[in-house]
Amino acid sequence: MCIIAVIGAPHSGKTVFINSLYRFLRQVNIRFFIHSACPDGEGRWCGETDQELVKKIRKKGKFDEHFVQYQLRVIENLRRSGFQLVFFDLGGLPSKENKQILEHCDYYIFLRRPDKQEVVQKWQELLDSLNIKPLAIFDSLWQGKPEFHIENNVVYGTLVRLDRAEVPENTLKVVGKFVEFLIEKFGGVSVSERFVVKVGETDEFVFVDIVVGGNGIIVPEELERLVKTVEQAVSNRYFGKGVIISGRLPIWAHSTLAHQFHTAKFVAHFDPRLGAVVVQSHSPDYKVGQVIPLEQIEPLL
């Protein structure tokens, strides 16, 4: 698996780019995870929430040694999680804290603002001092023509108007081409089925991983179909065992599936940064709030 840092000067459109990337990756059968490694309180949620509400509830944290050590533990756990690609959204300024995190990354995606040459140059100097490879370098502009090309197995291009309100279609096409590049480089195929359910099992539990095909978004009207698809895939394999549910699904879908398996020894939800968190149990060996470590789940990922 690869840890990929996403960096860029402040207001270069990193969050919007990551949101767009996420939507494309949801349509591909490739195991990925996106993690915010910046204490600015932002994340993908900012691009999917009313901006006035974002201003009210967003809370900035501190970029200190405690925060950095937490991020390094997250990287360590994610490397054992079975994901093919993990994207780390870093802070917008080159710093010793960002450097510590970058030292544990494999690749970087750099969003450059031509009008912020001083910051861009400092970022480049920091990157050149580390053993980290470029995956993509994009110029982020407010006006111009979106572009895309590959040179020496590195993507170069231009992203125009990475605006939270609406990203132009031509810019989205560039993001789509970049995802095609990722598939070719790291593996993965387009998801044609609506729900793809993969089931693995041990003596103690069944691991149920759900991928939503198409646009990657499930609506409440599809909940019954999801439950039936999962039922058919799992069948009676969970009898006498626990069930761990994994997948990028809304909370109401996870809750429905948890209820569906309420007769299992226990039910847990998979968190790639922690392991599987037990949410209900009929066994004295598994308590609510107990975390099943990644080491026990890793063979099934």
Image: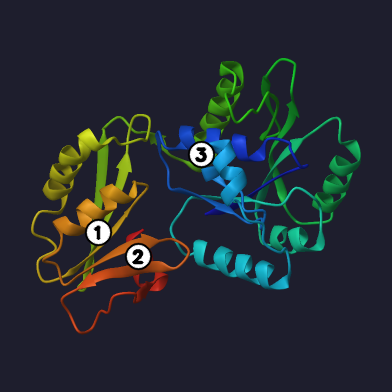
Q: Which residue is mark 1?
A: 200
Can you tell which quarter of the image residue 145 is in?
top right
- Horizontal side of residue 247 vs 58, given as left or right: left
Whole-number angstrom distance, CA of label 3 to CA of label 1: 35 Å
In this orientation, which residue lies closer to the viewer: 240 or 251? 251
In this orientation, which residue lies closer to the viewer: 4 or 280? 280
Please state the horizontal and vertical placement of residue 280, each as a whole percent of the image.
Answer: 23, 70
Q: Residue furthest right?
A: 118
Split into 4 quadrants, where in the image is the C terminus? bottom left
Q: Total number of numbered labels?
A: 3
Give me the residue at 68% from left, 23% from top: 161
Q: Dot 2: what SS?
A: helix
Which amino acid, mark 1?
A: Gly
Task: Answer with mark 3 or mark 1, whichever residue precedes in sequence.
Answer: 3
Q: Which residue is mark 2?
A: 299
In the displayed structure, would residue 273 be above or below residue 57?
below
Q: Which residue is mark 3?
A: 49
- Horizontal side of residue 212 vs 46, given as left or right: left
Give me the residue at 10% from left, 54% from top: 235
In the displayed structure, would residue 117 be above or below residue 235?
above
In the displayed structure, would residue 156 be above or below residue 186?
above
Whole-number angstrom distance, CA of label 2 to CA of label 1: 9 Å
Task: Answer with mark 2 or mark 3, whichever residue precedes in sequence.
Answer: 3
In this orientation, which residue lies closer to the viewer: 164 or 173? 164
